[in-house]
Every structure is written in structure tokens, then in C-alpha cells.
Image (spheres, rainbow, N blue to C red):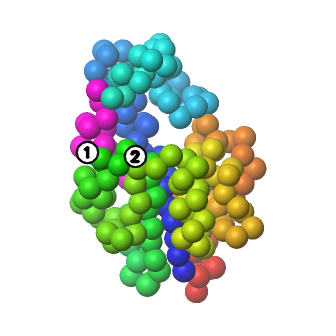
Amino acid sequence: MKFGFDVDDTLINLREYAFHYYKKQLGQEVAIDVFHSLDRLEIHEAFGMSDEEGKEMWNRSVDYIYYTDCPAYPGAVELLQQLDAEGHEIYYITARSAHHGKDTKAWLKKQGFPVQDDRFYCGMKDDKKVEIIEELELDYYFDDKPKVVETLDHDRLKVIVKDQSYNRHLDMPRFKEWTELDSLFKKQLK
Ligand SMILES: [Mg+2]
């Protein structure tokens, strides 16, 4: 089977990693509850920043956030390794800017994710992302972003949402932990 994965906040805990980095950089003590109640992807509001200030902060921080020690969600690396070992095809489709493609791919490999160079897509807008996902004719696709998962054709593709505070309004199959999916896949794929 063909499996597609978004990267940020689907396979790796990027926003929370960024949240802790912002706290340190800004010297602000913000409770983690604030993070968990954000209803949008961007995190700068938790620090009292405007969208413009948030964008600047993000641009200043992005290299650190992307390429240091952002943790994968527990069980994600192991599950993808297992799918790979069983002969399934694994695709990564990330909207990170195109110039981050090469380094992101290398970073994912370093974390243990099974990445084949020709099954890694980077640097597209959301509508193009949807197009790529549909052209790949995947069996399963995993993402956290409402704008992406809402646009996909759910008749042709099993779309599964990685549960996040900003996507709970979506009435779609979802999961909280990658370890939950292990048993689902074992049942469906064997
Ligand atoms: Mg994402």
C-alpha cells in the first residue's frame, strides 16, 4: 500500500518544540495549557505578538526549530520503519519552503525515518499539496492541517487527522498517538 505523511505536527512535535524555544528566547513564562488551547496553527499569540511580529519571530527561529532536536511523536519512527520493512511505499509531503527540502530530508533520515529521495515532496502551497497527494493515488494520508485535509477527496483516499487543538472541529477519523495506529494497521493490512 501507499502511505503519505505530512511532517510538521503530524510526525514530529514541531509547534510545541517552537513554543518552548520562544519561551526561552523571549524570557516569558507561558503555561503549557495556553499552548494546548490555541485554536490556530501559529503560536505567537501565546506570547502576545501580532501576526507581523509572529512572522518575524518565526523567520528568526526557523533554522533552529527545524534542524536541532525537535522530537518525533512517540511511535512514529518505529511505525514507519515497520511499514517500510513490510514493503509498503512511504511518501512525505511537506509544505516547508523549497530551500529547506534537502536539509529536511537529511534531518528526517537522521531521526530514523525511512526516506526514499524520490518519495519526498517539499515546498508547495496547500492547493498544490492537495494536487500532489491526489496524483500519488495514496491509500492513506495523514496530516494535521484543516485546510489540507478538508480539501482532499475522501472517497478515493483514507484521510486520517493527527489530533491537534486547532483541528477538533473536523469530523474525520483521527488519532492522538501513533502507538494507537499500530493495532489498526495490523488489523487492516494483514
Ligand atoms: Mg503539518
Q: Quadrant of the N terminus?
A: bottom right
**Identity of the amino acid at label 2?**
Arg
Residue 101 lies in magenta, yes or no?
no
Q: Earlier in the sequence, mark 1 or mark 2?
A: 1
Q: Residue 96 carries which label?
A: 2
Q: Is mark 2 on a helix, strand or loop?
A: loop
- Please tell me whether residue 2 is drawn above or below residue 20 in the rendered image: below
For the magenta stretch, what is the residue range?
60-73
Sort mark 1 into few (<14), some (14-19) or many (20+) by Cα contacts within 10 Å: some
> Splitting the image into 4 quarters, where does residue 28 fall?
top left
Q: Name the residue under label 1.
A: 67
- Please tell me whether residue 53 is drawn above or below residue 1 in the rendered image: above
Nearer-the-camera pick, 151 or 8: 151
Decide: marks 1, 2 in contact (CB < 8 A)? Answer: no
Q: How many labels does the image show?
A: 2
Residue 166 location, x and y as percent? Answer: 61, 37
Query: Is residue 154 toward the left or the right of residue 166 in the image?
Result: right
